Image (tube, grey):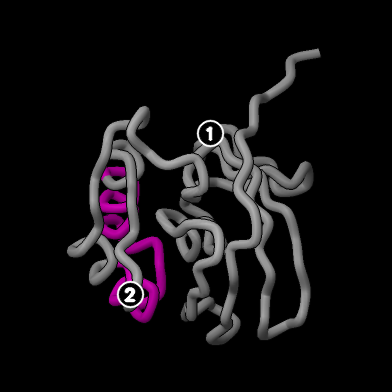
Amino acid sequence: MDNQIILTTGVYDAIKEHLRRRQVSQEEENQLTTELRHARQVLRRELPEDVVTVNKVVTIKDHTKETQHDYILVSSNKAKPKKNKYSILSDIALAAVGYKVGDVIEWPFKGGDRKIEIMKVENWVEKFS
């Protein structure tokens, strides 16, 4: 792992609980455990704008599948994949959370190892209509 991830304490705690409940594959657990051991925890207001976290729209380029997609990362109770809203504890979010624009990540997804790149991170605010 070349990059130290940056997480808010809330996201860090949510990932730790997710691991404790054995909600990921063994390979993902190993990688997440290593990342969390070296992660830098910050307050929400101290988190750089270009870091992947909850309530962000993240553009991810998948170098393995040669695709690019935008993901809205939200808290688990607001996840609606059909509306492109993914839980911060979903596979794609766990691979990207804590990384910043320009980072390239090799991740053991359930369907096989993939190499993804964080292209863009923007704030997302839910619109009530």
Q: Quadrant of residue 57?
A: top right
Predominant secondary structure, magenta span: helix
Left-right relation of 24 to 113: left
Of callouts 2 and 1, the N-terminal one: 2
**Viewport quadrant of the C terminus:** top right
| Secondary structure at numbered mark 2 | helix
What amino acid is found at the position of numbered circle 2 in the picture? Gln
> Label 2 neighbourhood size at 10 Å, few (<14), some (14-19), many (20+)?
some
Under mark 1, the amino acid is Asn
Local SS, label 1: helix
Crowding at dot 1, Cα within 10 Å, few <14 / some 14-19 / many 20+, comes out as: few
Picture coordinates of residue 21, whole percent (x, y)? 30, 56
Residue 97 falls in which quadrant of the image?
A: bottom left
Q: Is residue 29 above or below residue 6?
A: below
Residue mark closest to the camera, 2 vs 1: 2
Please, which residue is most extreme toward the top here?
129
Residue 16's label in the rendered image is none
From the viewer's side, name the closer residue of 22 and 87. 87
- Measured from the top left, where is residue 75 in percent x and y? 50, 36
At 77% across and 42% down in the image, what residue appears?
Answer: 83
- The answer to if 55 sits in the magenta stretch is no
Q: Quadrant of the N terminus?
A: bottom left
Name of the residue lying farthest toward the right: 129
| Mark 2 in CB contact with mark 1 (< 8 angstroms) | no
Residue ID for mark 2: 31
> Whole-percent x and y of residue 50?
51, 47
Residue 77 badge: 1
Q: Is residue 27 magenta?
A: yes
Residue at left offset 52%, top offset 74%:
104
Q: Quadrant of residue 85?
A: top right
Horizontal and vertical percent position of residue 87 = 55, 46
Highlighted range, magenta: 13-32
